[in-house]
Image (cartoon, grey):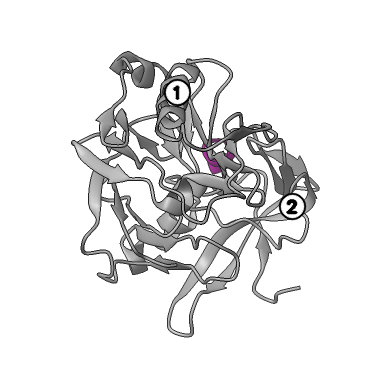
């Protein structure tokens, strides 16, 4: 209904950009370019490819902003108005707004829904204490990271570096729980259980196999989990990112294994909570800064 909206034609150069952004060839509906995209949780969106003037703030506008206007959105989209593309492809908001924000954005995900997080475009200097790790190459527009080692309670886990090299790793704000190669997860779980031996294990919960009944404890001491990223960048997992809490009687280690060691690992949003995560796409690096939000 926007007076400045325009459909993109099937024969346009812009229509040919879709495969790199979506992984699917475009369709054609009454001469209008049509897109399709599917996500890791099997949710999908199909619709028209168009452009319009995007107003981010009263001062920040982007003419001829290209985006998908969804006509059939199914899966875990209930109550969601749309998806914001923050990948490295030329059709992402990051790329289309590069002239204004320099391909830099950051966010902080709060530890609970009653707290406030934020998404920032451009380098506002708030994460001056960030520790950076370079991108690794995993294909398409995803953000790959090189995971070198993991620590529990300050002790390095005995995991062959080839385990992480074989799987690879991406960081994803849309995946809730971190997925690790089973070999790495087993080492993490066993070391964590050893550090939590004074607390009683309870029934597993869904994808979590290491859950504790803490109802008889007023204070809990747990071993800190740390990761060593490429560039020898060591980052502790925040306390809020260590557990998934289903009530005090079922507090679970918030990591899970992939099906096999060859499946790509995912650093999920639970493990990112309260940190400022800085994406400097131009410099090809990602930063982690503690204490960004509550």
Residue 27 rendering spot, x and y as whole percentages: 72, 38
Residue 287 rendering spot, x and y as whole percentages: 29, 51
Per the rendering, the mark at residue 190 is 1
Q: Answer yes or no: is residue 269 visible.
A: no
Q: Secondary structure at mark 2?
A: loop
- Residue 28 magenta: no
Q: Earlier in the sequence, mark 2 or mark 1?
A: 2
Relative vertical location of residue 198 with respect to residue 293 in this rendering, above or below: above
The one of 268 and 99 positioned closer to us in this rendering: 268
Residue 17 rendering spot, x and y as whole percentages: 53, 42
Query: Relative to residue 181, is residue 174 drawn left or right?
Result: right
Residue at the spot 49% in from the left edge and 63% down from the top edge: 110
The alpha-carbon separation of the residues under discs 2 and 1 comes to 36 Å
**Segment tinted magenta in the rendering:** 16-22
Per the rendering, the mark at residue 150 is none
Q: Which residue is mark 2?
A: 77
Q: Quadrant of residue 231?
A: top left
- Residue 19 magenta: yes
**Quadrant assignment for the C terminus:** bottom left
Q: Residues within 10 Å of mark 2 (few under 14, many from 20)?
A: few
Relative vertical location of residue 120 with respect to residue 82 in this rendering, above or below: below
Residue 92 rendering spot, x and y as whole percentages: 49, 52
Most frequent secondary structure within the magenta stretch: helix
Query: Relative to residue 205, is residue 256 drawn left or right?
Result: left
């Amino acid at each position: 209904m926007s007076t400045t909206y325009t459909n993109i034609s099937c024969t346009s150069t812009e229509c040919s950009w879709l495969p790199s952004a979506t992984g699917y060839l475009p369709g054609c509906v009454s001469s209008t370019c049509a897109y399709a995209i599917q996500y890791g949780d099997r949710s999908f969106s199909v619709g028209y490819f168009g452009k319009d003037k995007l107003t981010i703030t009263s001062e920040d506008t982007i003419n001829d902003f290209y985006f998908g206007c969804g006509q059939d959105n199914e899966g875990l989209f209930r109550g969601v108005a749309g998806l914001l593309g923050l990948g490295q492809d030329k059709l992402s908001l990051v790329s289309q707004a590069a002239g204004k924000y320099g391909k830099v954005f950051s966010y902080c995900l709060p530890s609970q829904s009653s707290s406030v997080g934020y998404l920032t475009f451009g380098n506002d200097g708030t994460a001056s204490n960030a520790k950076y790790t370079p991108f690794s190459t995993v294909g398409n527009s995803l953000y790959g990271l090189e995971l070198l080692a993991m620590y529990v309670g300050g002790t390095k886990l005995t995991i062959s570096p080839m385990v992480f090299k074989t799987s690879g790793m991406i960081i994803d704000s849309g995946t809730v729980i971190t997925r690790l190669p089973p070999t790495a997860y087993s080492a993490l779980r066993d070391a964590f259980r050893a550090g939590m031996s004074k607390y009683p294990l309870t029934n597993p919960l869904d994808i979590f196999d290491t859950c504790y009944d803490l109802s008889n404890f007023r204070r809990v001491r747990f071993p800190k989990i740390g990761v060593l990223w490429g560039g020898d960048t060591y980052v502790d997992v925040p306390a809020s990112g260590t557990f998934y809490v289903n009530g005090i009687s079922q507090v679970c280690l918030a990591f899970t294994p992939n099906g096999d060691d060859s499946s790509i690992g995912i650093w999920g949003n639970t493990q990112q909570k309260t940190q400022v995560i800085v994406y400097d796409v131009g410099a090809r690096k990602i930063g982690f800064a503690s204490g960004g939000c509550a």
